[in-house]
Image (cartoon, grey):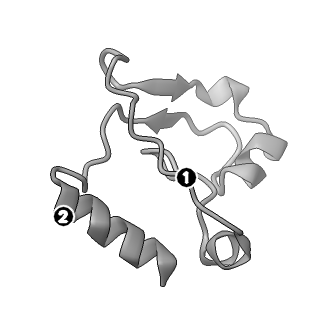
Amino acid sequence: VASGRFGVTPTFLVNADQLEIKIAQGAKPGEGGQLPGKKVSAYIARLRNSKPGVPLISPPPHHDIYSIEDLAQLIFDLHQ
């Protein structure tokens, strides 16, 4: 599960054998990982639960994880 959380749906979570939370993306400057809208095809949009042509941005940090307690809460929430 990366900071953009694209494609993370309840169905995805229920069917996952295990989860991995990607935390180390802080070295990317600015907006973090960016996929311009012109590269978001129908296939990519379907995989990422988005719309074709819409830019996808994965921010460097998770905006809901600032402490070990926040991480524990995210793990608990995703497990539900």
* For residue 38, above or below residue 74: above
User: Residue 57 has which mark?
Assistant: none
Q: Is residue 62 left or right of residue 42?
A: left
What residue is drawn where x is 49% and y is 78%? 79
- The image shows residue 43 at horizontal and vertical percentages of 83, 44
Question: Sequence-wise, which precedes: disc 1 or disc 2?
Answer: 1
- The image shows residue 67 at horizontal and vertical percentages of 16, 53
Label 1 and label 2: CA atoms lie apart by 17 Å
Helix or strand or loop: what does disc 2 sit on?
A: helix
What residue is drawn where x is 16% and y is 50%? 66
Residue 14, quarter of picture = bottom right
Question: Residue at label 2?
Answer: 69
* For residue 56, above or below residue 8: above
- The image shows residue 37 at horizontal and vertical percentages of 61, 30
Q: Is residue 14 left or right of residue 68?
A: right
Please identify the residue farthest to the bottom as the structure is shown: 80
Indicate the amino acid at tag 2: Glu
What residue is drawn where x is 32% and y is 15%? 29
Question: Residue at label 1?
Answer: 20
Q: Is residue 74 left or right of residue 1?
A: left
Q: Residues within 10 Å of mark 2 (few under 14, many from 20)?
A: few
Number of labels in the image equals 2
What residue is drawn where x is 25% and y is 49%? 63
Indicate the amino acid at tag 1: Glu
- The image shows residue 76 at horizontal and vertical percentages of 38, 76
CB within 8 Å, label 1 to label 2: no
* For residue 51, above or below residue 76: above
Q: Residues within 10 Å of mark 1 (few under 14, many from 20)?
A: few
Helix or strand or loop: what does disc 1 sit on?
A: loop
Residue 72, quarter of picture = bottom left
